[in-house]
Image (cartoon, rainbow, N blue to C red):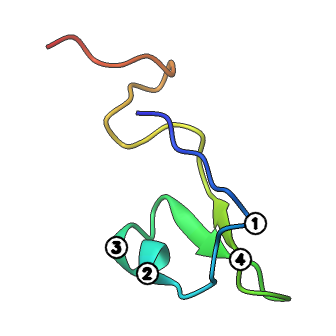
Amino acid sequence: MKVHIDEHKCVASGQCVLVAPDVFDQRDEDGVAVLLTTCSAACSPSGSKPAS
């Protein structure tokens, strides 16, 4: 799964961080969300999706 944050639409409520703290964090200066990783937990270490 590919995740993208539109910083201009982020309202800095922290809901994404509460739901997925291993994927999201918030900047200290303005609370806007940032990605901690470029690949979800469903991805393998090589960055590709696991076989179904």
Query: Which mark is in front, 2 or 1?
Result: 1
User: What residue would you read off at disc 3?
Assistant: 19
44 or 27: which is nearer to us? 27
Q: Which residue is mark 4?
A: 32
Dot placed on the residue nearer the N-terminal end, 4 or 3: 3
Q: Left of 51 or right of it: where is 19? A: right
Distance from the alpha carbon under mark 4 to that under mark 3: 15 Å
Image coordinates of residue 5 in percent, x first then y, are: 63, 55
Give the Cα separation between the discs numbered 3 and 1: 20 Å
User: Amino acid type of disc 1?
Assistant: His
Which dot marks residue 15? 2
Disc 2 to disc 4, C-alpha distance: 11 Å
Q: Amino acid at mark 2?
A: Gln
In the rendered image, the vertical position of residue 28 relative to residue 50, given as above or below: below
Marks 2 and 3 close (CB-CB < 8 Å): yes
Mark 1 or 4, which is nearer the eye? Answer: 1
- SS at mark 2 in the image: helix
Amino acid at the residue labelled 4:
Val
Sequence-first tag of 2 and 4: 2
Q: Mark 1 or mark 4, which has the lower sequence index? A: 1
Instruction: Report the front residue among 3 and 11.
Output: 11
Q: Position of residue 28 (x, y in %)?
A: 78, 87
Question: In the structure shown, which secondary structural element does the residue marked by tag 4 occupy?
Answer: loop
Q: Which x, y percent locates residue 19?
A: 34, 73
* Location of residue 33 by image quarter: bottom right
Q: Which residue is found at the position 60% from the left and 72% from the top?
A: 25
Indicate which label's residue lies in the foreground, 4 or 3. Answer: 4
Residue 6 in the figure: left or right of residue 43: right
- Residue type at mark 3 is Val
Give the distance between the C-alpha atoms of the residues marked 2 and 1, in whole angstroms. Answer: 16 Å
